Each structure stands twice: as structure tokens, then as C-alpha cells.
Amino acid sequence: MKKENFLLSATKTGLVGGAIAIFLCLIGMVEIFNKRDVIQGIVTLGQFVWLATAVGAGYTASQQTSHLLNGKKPAQNLTAGALAGFFSAALTAFLVWLGSQTDLRAIFINASPALYELLTFGKGLAGLPQLLIIGIISGIVGATFTLLPKAVQRPLLHALMMLIFMALFSGIFRVVMINQGNKWETLAKSIFSQTGLTQLGGWIFILGTIAISVFWSNRGEAVKASMARMPSKGKLSLRILVFLIIAVIALGLPQVSGPFIAQVIVIISLYILMGLGLNITLGFAGLLDLGFVAFFAVGAYTVGLLTSYGPFGLQHISFWVAVPIAVLVSMAFGAFLGLPVLGVRGDYLAIATLGFGEIIRLLAGSDFLAGYFGGPQGVIGIQKPCLGVLEPFIKLDTPRICDGIEIGQGAADHFLAGPGGIYYLAIISALLIAFVAWRLRESRLGRAWMAIREDEDVAEALGVNLIQTKLLAYILGAAFAGLGGAIFSVLIGSIFASSMQLLVSINVVALLVVGGMGSIPGVIVGAIALIGLPELLREVSEFRYLIYGTVLIVMMLAKPEGLWPSQATKRELHHETSAQGGD
Amino acid sequence: MRATFSERLVDLAVNIFLWGFRILIVAIIIIGTFFTIREGKYTSEQWIDFIVFGISQGSIYAMIALGYTMVYGILRMINFAHGDIFMTGAFGAYFTATWLTKAGFVDANPFLGLLIPILVAMAVSTLIAVLVERIAYRPLRGAPQLVPLISAIGASFFLEYAFRGFFGPGKYAYPPIKALEGTWEIFGIGILKVQVVVAISAFIMMALLYFVVMYTKIGKAMRAVSENKDTAALMGIDVNRIIVTTFAIGAALAGAAGVLFALVYRQVDFFMGFTPGVKAFTAAVLGGIGNIPGAMVGGLVLGVFESVGPSLFLEGLGITRAYQLKDAIAYTMLVMILLFRPQGILGERLSKQKA
Amino acid sequence: MNKRLFALLSLLVIASMALAACGGTPATEEPAATDAPAATDAPAATDAPAAYECTDALGCVKIAAGEPVHIAYWGVLSGADGSLGEDSKRGVEIAIDDMGGKFMDHDILLTTEDALCTPEGGATAAAKLATDSSLVALIGSSCSDETVGGIAAISNAGLTTISPSNTRPALTAPDRGPDYAGYLRTAHSDAFQGKAVAEFAYNVLGVRKAATIHDGSAYAQALQQVFADEFAALGGEIVAQEAVAKDATDMRPVLTSIAAKSPEFIYYPVFVAAGGYITAQIREIAGLENVKMAGSDGIFTPDFVTAAGPNVQGMYLSSPDFSAFASGYASFVEKHNAKYGEAPLSIFHAHAYDAANIIFAALAKVAVVDADGTMYVPRQALRDAIYATTDFQGITGVLSCSASGDCGAPVIAVYEVVNSDPASWNPQDATNPNPKKIYP
């Protein structure tokens, strides 16, 4: 095959980069991110995003050049990078020019004067040459990067990643540190600005990361080797030490970080519970359930109705009694909704379960059943659980005293009143359920599920009772999700049918696949990546789902087996792709 | 192999439950219908209106469902982003139609004023669908079934929120075509002109599609690929080209459906594809996924159930505000039909390989 | 597997060291805004020079010289309802501009927290705000659901919030419970709005048979119920109360079902999408060609006129009465249009402006400045001062806050849409308003 001219290839890459840059400008990302800093006074997040397209184009063009010319040739590589950077910037310049000729805003609402001003450095069309020059320089920077030896590339890349990470999360770090007292406050204010990193902070993170990265690439092997040489007793004690440290962090975290981090971790834990539940029905038994939120809703509503002091509360019983009941009711629903679809396979099952999820949500929010579930007004006044074991199991009337404090009579509140306390409840539940799920997988039942997943007909022929095994998958999956719902209801203190959207079910399926199907650590990693990060990055909420969607696609392209796949999936996938090689 | 006593007991209980479930739903429908009709709240004209509204909604479902079903037939993949492809078409048509209306073109040539936006919508949808296929789906061929599904969900979010970024969260009002306002008398019944146009265009497009799939060379190739990709490739069929063609045809239909939707309901916004997308997927499954006439039947059945169901089944049972539960009826119908026919109305029994 | 495990563990070790270092201190220096603020007045007091001793029950916010006074807006800023929150946020921004961006030589810093118009979103936003000990007071939320989810965290953190746009009656009911200790609003309660529409329909339009539609949202369901009760109390007949799904598009079946009961008046206080579909389709239904339509503040936006199309002409919409607003409102709108290049997006910007100014006025009463220029804001005192607001000259009227948190001057008007072109939307226009006020 005749190889393409490298200049032509670089031009194409530059145009693709430019198209991405225009896309980012027109969806408003460049302008809105411009309010955030990466490093105060040096580069804003908006500028950073735009620069990234030009640098990326230069990098890619240079890589392709090396490929086309069978090796690195600095002059050509840099030329290609500059060309790609130029075309990348040229498209943006074209956008600005077009915007000055016609009112693009009639169609694209984000093609605003503020955007043009930003892109032309406030100089109008006269600023365009400057933009092109910056594009070329960025392209060359990207190309130069490919020419550097690996040992230099890696620390730089790490530093860049660290910088972005710290800049994005600066607000959270800043607030948490300020809460620790005066010394920490001074430190926080010198590293983090209100909207990003200070210059000092930027340098600390860049240089610090480079230092660690260089140290690790030089000495890492030695450290690993010394670890491997350690006697088994030493290893054990090291493990215990690490475990203890993790436990201490986990215990102390909400006290140090304040309620926000605790709240996010509770939400992650709830998704972990749902994910572990779906991991049984879908990951182990292969039954695709797109209406999993139904069981979450059942658990939440059961606890809500049993413990609420609002207008729809049935019995004001203790949370600790309501939870087992909620789990049992969820299990019953698991069986009830599982039974009709026992004979339904594949994607028919997906849509039937999706239907169930929607039916539950619609009924719970309907006026028809509003007398029982509150309809659109929801179930409110759900009491937070009391910790005391000696707390009466059935609390029928006021005044409600909880852990020695009369509930809600002042700012002081009992332990489990806020996310800081419910955090422990959620973490312990998630760990417990993870353990149960792990034991289940290793059990006879677990093997039966996996047999069904691999081949229903063969499993039946081998003596697996399809009806019972499938039903148990639904029932146990539902139980886990129901527990999640129960905790959710006391976390928020009120339940609305509008919280039980199809989107929740989709999120759970996505986190399972992104984490790695059938893998228990995968569920945890998936929940942190897909639920935790978006919650922490609240400031970019305009683009939350756009980024979410992009991440899903990129994840599937880059790691279709998931972030932490189970051994079986890894083997299987490897096998399949090699078989499909000729496709 | 012998089942133990307890196992047989469970099986028996399950069977009793399932039959009870079937009988219960059928009984609810019959009793509800009986009481509604006895009360005589609605005139027969109103019943006919309900059915006509259902058919026009159903034909839009059907057109979207065709795209789902075609892609599924060939790739065994749920193209979750299909509803959003429909949305992109509607946006393309909106800008064209607004421009044409402002220029006074639509009032002068109502037929072209309808046709040009439809063609633009089909072109936009096709372009985007082909891009999505190339970037997000093609590299995943041969991966486990759920991987392309998640990628499709990602594509769906991406399209929705990219369009939200471009055009904002607001609603756009699709310009009405003056010539299509008012009603036509057909067999003595007044039917809205738009709905007649929608039903007829939908029918023409579905007939064309059926013809293409059944009687042309490319259709034959599609069916061959759907049976077995590897064998088809051995027979000299360019599998990738056929798959792209399938996506393109499905997307073109969705784009056209987007225009018809905008004509009937007058609103265009970035999220408009989600609910119709889910409904169309339901319709495709209802009719038997992978089956083209099935998608048409499924769409129409779903549309009519949604429109007639709340008044006919629920009001008789004394359930107030029945239209809130319209979707619940649609999904209950779906489960019911799957209970009696797990493969959908016109679907064939799923063999192992296809499931 | 070992490699990955090792990487993970080493990461955790590093993280743990960092955090263990943080963890050492808080035993003595409790943050000022944790779950138990009663016990936390200590740090501000111990850190302060002897000149000022914080004795406030909820603790004090310490603002050193040169540091900004930090207030936050929380509400919906993204998604379909984003314009509601954006509108209020602008009201706050203008209030800050009017202060010259400064409060007693300190810059005013406004941050925002998106609460997504859901109870979970409200809870998460509130948790984040409760973590930030530099916050003085809040303005928000936009949707009542957000308040229901988040208010406990905010009250318990010692913060006080004034909502410019929550209209759910229960939020300021006398028995609303101690979680609402830190909650007030300048918006009107829907109890007033539903009543105004019912009186307008019965007395002015003279209709006797009315129907309602809601979209399953708490707002619409409650509002149409208030209307139905009031209308029936006046002697009218409610012939149908229907509901649709929030994402429904085909309204013809439900409208046909309503048409069978031949109402003269249909009230649908829903949001833009559903409202647009209903208005666009209603005239096509046999029997509803001449029915009178009415909606409420949820669709009092040009967006709705865009979505509804030509049928919107002659529709009635209820909203706060702009003409009853004080004279300051006209200059507010001028500033708004100059600053943002467009007319206000929704109807609660003025309420947000007033909410911010109530906070600044209360702040001026309670803030204490130390010898070295450090400012202290005692939180309980601030809260009490806000509740004690009386005869405040706001642009929405003269405001006095009740013990249950109602500060608004609930003057509701009914407007008629006189032009279906969204570009002509300008209810504040003196000569040519659209929609035009017709009642009272």
C-alpha cells in the first residue's frame, strides 16, 4: 500500500483538531470554562481546553509522521506538528471571521461576542494572527513532546494530569483544608485560589509530580523488589498495617472532610449496593434488567412509609425494624416482577424490565395511588435512624427522643441525622453486601447462575433448575437494591417518584459494564468513576452528561472488558477478539 | 433426571401464578371496557378520534422502530442513540423550515415546503448516524453484547447534550404549514390534515423500505448479513458497507419521522428523542424485534393502546386521571403480549444463536 | 493482579499519610460548620483576638481584612428548568452590583451551586454548602423539591437561606418543623395564586364549569388542587381534573376526554413543554374550539409562547403583579437589560434581588468589626435579624417576614397574552405590554 504524504496527513489531523475546537467553542465549553482557572493569572480552564485541541493535533500529526516515515525525523515531525496546529487554529479563526460577517447566534446560541472576544484577545479580527501563531506554537509543542525520550515524556505527562486534577478539584480541597483550622487555612489559600490553583500551587504540583515520577521510574523497580524479598511475616504485617490505615481513614473521613464528601460517598455506596444487586442478575446470571430502579424504589418507599411522621406514614417504627421489612418486600417484588418474564430472553427481557421500572415509578407518582404513596407530593418527614440499641423498637408518638436528644428541637442533632453519620451505615452495608455477593459467587448457586449466563439450554440439560435459579437471581438482586433504597430514604428524608427515573437504571448498567461485568471490585470502581466523579465536579454541571457520554464511549473503545474485569471476562474477551480477528 | 418434590411444587406455583397473572390482566381489561362503554361517557365520534390520534402517534413510533429493528436484525445490537438521531433530523428540518417559511416559500409551495425539510432532515440524520456508527460502534464489533449497548447509551447522551450546547435548552416551535391546518372529511369523519399526511407519508416510507429489503439486491444482501455475517462475507458481500447502509436507511427514516413529529406536535428540543426512542424500541420488541412488518404493527398497536387505553380500560374501573398512567398501560400491554408470545407479535422464536 | 493491587495500596498509603496529617488537628480545632454547630462556637472565639468574643449559639463567620464576604446562590442552573435559576441568580448579581460589589470594605463573593431541581440534587448541594465554613448566608433554592431535600443540612449548619422562587405552601406552614429554622422566602405561596385564578375565572370571566390538568409535578398538582377547591367554594363546578405525564407529547386523547365533559375554562399550571403541547393541540379538539385557557407562573415565560405557537393568543397567565412592584423595579429592569443584553428570563429576579438585599440589611445590623479590621458575623443573630425584617422597602413591595418564614408581598395578577410572537414578550412595558395585565 502506498503511504500517504505526511504533510497531507498532518493537514487532515489539524482539520479534525480544528473541528473539535469549533465544537467545544460552539457548545459553550470554552467560554464557560474560562471562568475557572488552571493556574491563576496564567491559563484558564477554557484556554486550556482550546489549547489542548491544538497541542493534541500537533502530537497526533507528529506520531503519524513518524509512522509514515518509519521513524522520528525531527524536522519533518516539527513541520507536521506546526501544520496541524496551524490548521487547527485556522478553523477557529474562520469561525471568528464568520461570526463577524453574519450573526451565528441566530442558530448557535453560544457563538456570543464574549466568545469572540476571548478568542481574539479582545482585539477583534486583528487578534486572529496571534491566535494562529499560538496554534502553530501549540502544534510544535505537541510534536516536540513525541520527540522526547520516554523518561522525559512520562514525568511531564504525569505533571500535566496532576495539574488538571488539582485544578478541577481545587474548590473541594480548599474548603476542606480551611475547615481544619488556621495553619491549614493559610496553606490552602496560598496553594488554591477561589477558582483554581495559585501560581505557587501550580509550581508545587508540577515540580512535585515530576520529582515523584522521576524517582519512581528510577527506583520503583528496586522498591518493588525489596517488597518482594520481604519475608512473608513482614508482608503480612505490612498488609495489616495498610488495612488499618485504610480503616482509620474510612472512619475519620467524614469528621475531617465535612458533610459534602460524606454525602458523595454515601451516594456512591448506594450505587454500589444497586450495582452489586444488578451484578447478580446481570453479571452472574446474564439477565439484562433495565428497570432495576424499581427495587430501589420499593425499598425506599417501604422504609419511608413505615417510619415517616408525615401525612402518609403508616407506622412510626424504628428504622432498624423497617430495613429488614424493606428488604423482604423488595425480595417479594423481585419474585413478583421476575415471574412473568421467566420465559423471556435477551433484549425482550431488557425492554420488559424497563417497562416494570417505569410502571412502578408511574404508579408511585400517580394521583390514583396518591392516598397511599403521596403521589407528586411524595413521602416526607422520614425520620433519621437512632443509633441506640436500646431505643424502643416501636416508637409510636411524640416527643421523639433519639440517642438522648429530642429530635429536631435545636441545631444539635443525633449521630445518624446527617450524611456524616449515614456514611457509616452506607459503608458498612456496602461492605457487607460485597462480602455476601462474593460468597454467593463462589457458591453452588453462583455457578448455576454463570451456567445460565453462558448457555441457558445447556444449563437446563445439565440439571440446573432454570425457574428457581433465575428467580433467586431476581430476588437477591432486588434485596440488595432494596437495601440501597432504604438508606436513600433516610439520607434524603423524603421520597419522590421523580427520583426513580429510568436514568438511574441506565447508570447502574453502565457502571457495571464500565467497572467490569461480574466483577465485585469492578462495581466499586465503576461507581466511583461514573457516580462519584460527576458529583464532585458539580461546577461543570452544564457539561456533565456530555462528558459522561463521551467517557462511556471512550471507555468502551479503550477497555471494553471494564476497569477491573473478573478473570473469566478477561479470558473470554481475549479469546473472542482473537477469533474475530479477520472481521 | 428427576426433579425433587419441592422443585415440582415451585414449578406448579409458578405456573399457577403466571396463569393467574394472565387472567387478571385480561379480566381487568374486559371489566374496565365493559363499564366504560356502559357509562357511555364518550360518543362514537370521540372513540374514532381516539383511534385516529393513536394511529398518527403510532405511525411515528413505527418509523423510528424500523431503524431499531433493522439495526438489531443485522447486528443484534440495541442502538440506544436512535431516538437522538430522530432529534437531530428534527433540528435540521426546523432550521430549514423556519428559513423557508420566512422567505414565504412554504405558503407558495406547500408540498415542496414539506418535502425539502424532510429531505434535509433525512440527510442530517443519515450523516450523524453514519458518523456515530464509524466512531462508536464499528470498533466494537465482536465485543460482548453489552459493550455496544453502553457505547450507544454514551452516544445518546453525547448527541443530546451536544445539541443542547449548540441550540440551548429551550423549545423551538416548528412553523406550521398553512395548507395543512384544519380537517378533511374522510368517510364522514373529520380528521386533522396533518395526521392524514403523517399517516400517508409513514405508510409510503414503510412500503418503500419493505420493497427495498425484500426485492432489491442490497436488501437481499442485508438479509444475508442478518442471517450470518461470516457466510455473507464469503459470498462476496461487503459486510461493512451493508451495515453502514442499514444504519443510513434507518437514520433516514428516523429523520423523516422527526419532521412528521415536529409537524404534529410543533415542538423541537434537544431531549425530544428520548421518550419516543424508548417507546419505539418498545414497539419494535412488541412486534418482534428484527422483523420489519413487526415494527409497523408494534408501533401502531402501541400508539392506539396509549390513546384509547386510559379511557377505555381504566376509567371504567373508577381510576381518575387515567392519562397519567398512559405509559403504564403501554408497558403492561407489552408484558402481557410477551407473556403469551415471548417473541413478540410477529417475531420468530429466538434460536440460541440469536438470543 | 499483584501489580495492580500494589499500585492501589501504595496510592492509599500516600493518601493516608496526607489525610492522617490532616486528621491529627481537628480534635482540638473543630470546623465551624459541621453537623453539630452548637458545640462549635469555640474555634472562632479561640482564634479571635481578645477584643471580640463570639458567643453566638450557631457560631460566627470570621472574615479577615481583605477577604470577601461569601454568599452563595443555590438552585437549578442546568437542565430543562435552568432558566428559572439563572433568572434568580441574575437578580442576586444585580443586588451585589448595587452594593458596589462591596460590603463594609469587604468584596462580596457570590458562588453558585447547582441543585438540579430534584430533592437529591438539593441534598447534595446543601451538603456542599454546609461544608463551606466561609459562607455567611444563602439565596435559594429555585425548586421546592430542592428545599425539601436540602433544608435540614442548611439549617443544621447554622446557615440561613431565602428562596426567591419556592411556592409550595407547606414550606412556610406554621407547623413546618425545626428543620426549616433557616428557611425564609420572598416568593408567594401557591395558596394565593390558585385562589386568584379561581376568583378571576368565576367573577371576571363568569365561567361556571372548569377543568384542570396537571403534569404529575408537586407544583402543578398542588396548584390545580387549590384552584379546584377555591373554584368550587365560589359556587363553580369542576367537571374534570386530569393529569398527564411530564414527558407526554400527544395531548389530544386527554383533551378529547376532557372535551366530553364540556368545560368552559381549562386551567393547566404546568411547565413549558407540557404547557406548549396542550396549548398547541387544544384548538384541534371538537368541543374545545372556544374554551378559555389559563396557566400560571411556571409558563409565564417567552419560552412558553415560543413552544405554544399561535394558539397562545388570548391565554391567561397568573404571575406576581409587576405593576404592584415598587418604583425601583423599573430601574432594576433597565440595569438587567443593560447587563445581560436581554429581558429577564423568568419572573423571580426581583424576588431574588429583594432576598439579597434583606440579607445585606440584616448583615449590616449584626456584623461586628474588630480592632484589626476583622469582621465577625454571628450566625444565630443574623438569622434572627432576617426573621425580624419589617417594612423592608423592596422592589416587589414592602416586605415583612413572618415567624414561619414568609417575607413575600403576595400580590397576584392575571395577564392575558395579546401577541403570539415571543419577541414581543414584555409584561413590564408601559405602553404596549405583552402579556397584558387584566386582573385585578
Image (cartoon, grey):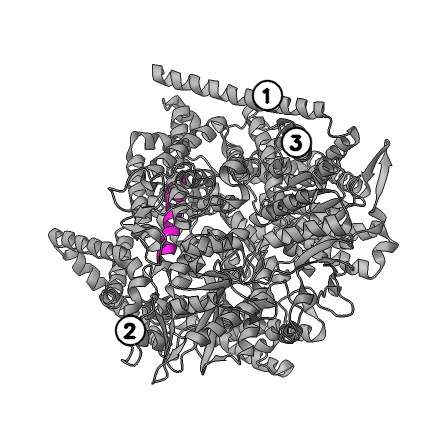
- Looking at marks 3 and 1 on the same chain, the residue that comes earlier in the sequence is marked by 1
The residue that disc 3 covers is B309
| Residues at discs 3 and 1 in contact (Cβ within 8 Å) | no
Q: Are marks 3 and 1 on the same chain?
A: yes
Q: Are marks 2 and 3 on the same chain?
A: no
Magenta-tinted stretch:
A262-279
Q: CA distance from mark 2 to mark 1?
A: 72 Å
The residue that disc 2 covers is C45
Q: Chain of mark 3?
A: B
Query: Which corner quadrant holds the N terminus of chain A?
Result: bottom right
Magenta stretch, main secondary structure, is: helix
| Magenta residue check for A231 | no
Q: In this view of the protein, can residue B121 be seen by the observer?
A: yes
In the image: residue C265, left or right of residue A76: right
Give how far across and how far down residue A288 sits, in percent: 47, 37
Q: Secondary structure at mark 2?
A: helix
The residue that disc 1 covers is B27
**Nearest the camera: C320 or C6?**
C320
Q: Nearer the viewer, mark 2 or mark 1?
A: 2
| Magenta residue check for A274 | yes
**Image point 54% across, 63% down: which residue?**
C407
Specify the amino acid type for callout 1.
Ala
